[in-house]
């Protein structure tokens, strides 16, 4: 039996959960990859719809996700994410000191990148065929040999924050524990956390904000 989810909000329309690093958002291919946010929500809420997830976090990313329980909520929330009506903020720990690379305390990263079709799911910088990813960032603190960063993604592309952190045209330092772009060796090590999520309630239209502190 899979462990239960950390549910931080629940009503008739959706739940907000705190996903641990190392857990898939949706099932992968094969019976050994069924354990996921989707599967655990279906176990906890047997009457929920077949496809409850309306957005995803990378397996290695921890933090807040909203999961629909009804078809109406799924449609409404999905549109909000597609039309960028939601607000998402992340906290990350970088494997190095940003103050040794730049005096800037904040900024915006705009990089064109695409899937490396020969090395999935790696994303690569490509100024000709890539699509632009946009991220606002702010330095929170230098902690020993590490840098704590606040990210606000404008676009929501695959591995966007991970690539914007590590690439020399971004911040130039990988996220701690990143197995694709840094020195992570196994699932559950990466220090990237979805710390704040805001959206409109699918029925009441109330603007809701949920927060979660990272455990790093």
Image (tube, rainbow, N blue to C red):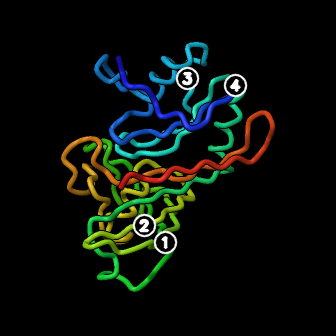
How far is mark 2 from mark 1, CA to CA? 6 Å
Q: Nearer the viewer, mark 4 or mark 1?
A: 4
Q: Residue furthest bottom?
A: 103
Left or right placement of residue 210 versus residue 141 in this view = right
Q: Which mark is residue 51?
A: 3
Relative to 30, residue 141 above or below: below
Residue 116: give x, y in percent of width and height: 31, 48
Which of the marked residues, 4 or 2, is nearer the chain's N terminus?
4
**Within 10 Å of the Cα at label 4, are there few (<14), some (14-19), or many (20+) other Cα atoms?**
few
**Is 170 or 130 nearer to us in this picture?**
170
The residue carrying pointer 2 sits among few (fewer than 14), some (14 to 19) or many (20 or more) residues within 10 Å by Cα, namely many
Position of residue 197 measured from the top left corner of the image (x, y, whole percent): 59, 49
Which residue lies under the disc numbered 4? 12
Residue wearing tag 2: 149
Asked if the residue under mark 1 is in contact with the one under mark 2, i.e. CB atoms within 8 Å, the reply is yes
Q: Which is more foreground, mark 3 or mark 1?
A: 1
Front disc: 4 or 3: 4
The number of numbered badges drawn on the structure is: 4
Q: Is residue 72 toward the left or the right of residue 175 in the image? A: right
């Amino acid at each position: 039996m899979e462990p239960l989810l950390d549910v931080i909000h629940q009503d008739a329309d959706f739940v907000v959960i705190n996903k641990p690093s190392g857990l898939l958002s949706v099932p992968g291919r094969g019976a050994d990859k069924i354990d996921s946010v989707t599967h655990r929500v279906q176990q906890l809420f047997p009457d929920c719809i077949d496809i409850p997830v309306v957005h995803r976090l990378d397996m290695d990313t921890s933090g807040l996700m909203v999961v629909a329980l009804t078809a109406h909520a799924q449609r409404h929330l999905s549109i909000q994410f597609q039309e960028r009506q939601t607000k998402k903020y992340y906290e990350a720990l970088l494997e190095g000191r940003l103050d040794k690379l730049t005096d800037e305390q904040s900024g915006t990263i705009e990089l064109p990148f695409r899937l490396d079709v020969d090395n999935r799911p790696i994303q690569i910088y490509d100024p000709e065929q890539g699509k632009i990813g946009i991220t606002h960032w702010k330095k929170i603190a230098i902690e020993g040999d590490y840098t704590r960063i606040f990210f606000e993604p404008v676009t929501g592309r695959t591995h966007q924050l991970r690539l914007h952190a590590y690439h020399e045209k971004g911040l130039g330092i990988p996220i701690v524990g990143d197995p694709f772009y840094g020195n992570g060796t196994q699932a559950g090590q990466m220090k990237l956390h979805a710390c704040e999520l805001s959206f409109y309630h699918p029925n009441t239209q109330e603007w809701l904000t949920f927060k979660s502190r990272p455990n790093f």
